[in-house]
Amino acid sequence: MFRLADAKPIANGHIREVYQHPDDADLLIKVITSASIEERWNQAPWFRRIARSGPYKDFVREFKEYVTSIYVGAYATSPLARIVGLEMTDIGMGQIVEKVRRPDGQLAPTLHSWVQSEGFSERTRSELEEFYARLLSHNVIAADLHAWNVVYGEDSRGGPRLVMIDGFGEKNIVPHCSMNRAHNASRTKKKYERMLKRTMAEAPKR
């Protein structure tokens, strides 16, 4: 069991905290916060608590999408962050993922941070177009596609490139995105165009 209770998260979200893996500098551990479990599971309506995996249903959803993206993409590198496995910690079950990093080993910047730092250039547009093409070729269900769930960096599979680190997989009760690839591609196009428009609008003027 990994002991994280006294460790400081290196990233925080409303639902999860992200910790550096104690034994491997290239890995991270994502843990669902106790507050999130209370709010989104213990206090949720009964129909939201049907999942057999309980509050860890997001882990199951993301792992399924990661595996599917590899298979559908003919085993090419997935545009999703690499999921390594699960481990118990002293603050709950943890999802082990590979760190997407900068050349200095630090966490890769989000798309939003990258553009805020370097501006929106032809290179940015090219990287975004390549990322979008990979989402389509791997038939990724990009449920929450926005500039804070995508980072620009490298990992053991190569890079630098844009990688989606969170918010992927089928969330709908009726899994319509999983049932029809053309329908999913249409939804992905709308989400990508919305993300692109907002990213360009918020980019600093050079």
Image: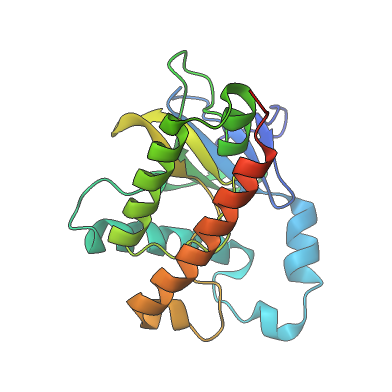
- Looking at the image, which residue is at 48% across and 61% down? 142
User: Which one is nearer the viewer's eye here, 137 or 19?
Assistant: 137
| 93 over 120 or under it: above or below | below
Measured as percent of width and height from the top left, residue 118 is found at 57, 23
- Looking at the image, which residue is at 36% across and 81% down? 180
Does any portion of residue 71 appear in the rendered image?
yes
User: Which one is nearer the viewer's eye here, 48 or 110?
Assistant: 110
Measured as percent of width and height from the top left, residue 27 is found at 45, 31
Q: The N terminus is located in which quarter?
A: top right
Does any portion of residue 90 appear in the rendered image?
no
Quarter of the figure with residue 107: top right
- Looking at the image, which residue is at 58% across and 31% down? 115
Quarter of the figure with residue 155: top left
Side of 76 relative to 89 (left or right): left
Side of 20 relative to 124 (left or right): right
| 130 over 45 or under it: above or below | above
**Residue with the most extreme front position:** 206
Measured as percent of width and height from the top left, residue 173 is found at 56, 83
- What's the colour scheme? rainbow
- Looking at the image, which residue is at 64% across and 49% down? 198
